[in-house]
Amino acid sequence: MCLAAKHLTLVFSATFLLPFPSLRRHLPSLLPPRARRRIPRRGRGLVATAGRGRRPPLSPAAAGPPAPLLPAAAAMATPGAKEDVLSRYRSPLVSRYASPEMGFNFSERKKFGTWRRLWLYLAQAEKSLGLPITDEQIKEMEANLDNIDFEMAAEEEKKLRHDVMAHVHTFAHCCPKAAAIIHLGATSCYVGDNTDLIVLRDGFNLLLPTLARVISRLADFAEKYADLPTLGFTHYQPAQLTTVGKRCCLWIQDLCMDLHNLERARDDLRFRGVKGTTGTQASFLQLFEGDHSKVEELDRLVTAKAGFKRSYMVTGQTYSRKVDIEVLSVLASLGASIHKICTDIRLLANLKEIEEPFEKDQIGSSAMPYKRNPMRSERCCSLARHLMTLVLDPLQTASVQWFERTLDDSANRRVCLAEAFLTADIILSTLQNISEGLVVYPKVIERRIRQELPFMATENIIMAMVKAGGNRQDCHEKIRVLSQKAAAVVKQEGGDNDFIARVRADPYFSPIHKQLETLLDPSSFTGRAPQQVAKFLKEEVRPALIPYQSKMGGKIELAL
């Protein structure tokens, strides 16, 4: 290192270390001699710096005794103490919001019960293809599919540090006659990955009917208010009129895209199948003494037993983690749709035009009794943000899977896959509850239109005056002057828009005074919105809901 560079490094290091006394003590060689002499000797602390306005450290006596543990924490710290469920963190996704069905789908009981079923499917298929497995062994496995000793499995996992082998031993303990053939030829991912794919498929099957019900409820709402004019907004500034039903159709269209995407993602899922440790099926080829056709048939049989039409033709030890990207991408997209819908509802609630349901005894604010906060929509937005971020996990995981697999996917997937489906379940259920109780205030909507419509009607007034024999340029100038005066009343005085009153009072416009009511009819400003609603619902929305007709009943009541 040249002398100049070395000097620059020392100056920078000294400058950086000066504000940090603890670093100055431990790295004195980086300081210039004068600064080094100011470092307190070991054991003397920083008392020497107190005179320059810095607070000396408290002695143990001055600091006082440590805060006592909460009773529950003290109990948990006692060896052998019984666990109190309220003394441990519980995810609010499950403890507060998620449906029991989705909670069970990602439960330990579902997971390990599915492992046992997969071991049974494998044994049944191997037996049918000639391996020496007896009916007695199969029956023993069938009788113990849900007889899971979770405490024993936990103890085995502590000892073995391997969750799959812990459950192999636990299952074998229930099935001593079948112990020798449980997990025969398989690798951990046979149960792990295949179970994940089953759970993902079942998760989609739980989400799709709820999404269909949301679309159905909103479709009924759109149909009911198809021709109710309302002020449109672009940039959240007043724009041309639309209708309440047409605006709702914008929400429905996004959700119909999500319905299609979720159906596609579910139907694209395949079974990992029976592929062995690195995906080559070598162990099964050995079991069947080189008979490739039996290995292929084994894969086909187990895939069918698990309820899948196809398995992935090639895998490493795991199925491609890009599958998880596809799954969480469609859920994140659903989250974006719901966030947009509920944001619109929150804004409309502020305008007092549309509100989500508000319970009789519901409290909006502990300090302001009059408040009617859109808490359901706010919850949806809050959780949708979380859902949209979760797709980043599988993106990164898939990008760093080395060769046939590496285990740094495991812990991450335990979190992100479950949380994505639980969160999607929560916001869909909440949105169904919202859509079943939306409240519209037509009089408020009408009043807001009256405030803005006069300015929008100026072109119609000009056209009517020209037809009555007026001069277009003269009429334009008259309207410009009157509209600016009316705008000043609204903006500077806080008054109502009196533009039409000014037109009525001006003799120049007497030829069209009788036409003003017709010219100001809001329905004449909504274009084809009502017709668009009817056509969209008939041709796109209702047909998409046909597969879910048997599941359209039942309202959602939120516990919280």
Image (cartoon, rainbow, N blue to C red):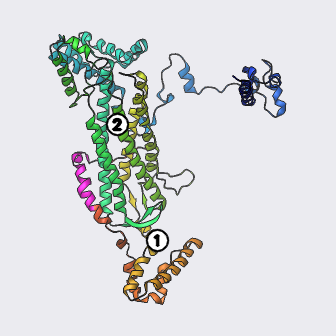
Compare residues 5 and 157 and report the one nearer the observer: 5
Where is residue 183, by image quadrant? Answer: top left
Q: Residue furthest front?
A: 2
Compare residues 348 and 355 and report the one nearer the observer: 348
Image check: 21 left or right of 165?
Answer: right
Counting from the top left corner in percent of width and height, residue 65 is at 70, 24
Magenta range = 534-553
Counting from the top left corner in percent of width and height, residue 439 is at 39, 59
Where is residue 294, by image quadrant? Answer: top left
What amino acid type should be assigned to the residue bearing mark 2?
Val
Residue depicted at x 33% and y 69%: 527
Counting from the top left corner in percent of width and height, residue 532 is at 29, 62
Residue 526 forms part of the magenta stretch: no
What amino acid type should be assigned to the residue bearing mark 1?
Glu
Residue depicted at x 27% and y 20%: 275
Q: Which mark is residue 218?
A: none
Numbered-mark total: 2
Task: Determine which residue is flagged by label 1.
Answer: 452
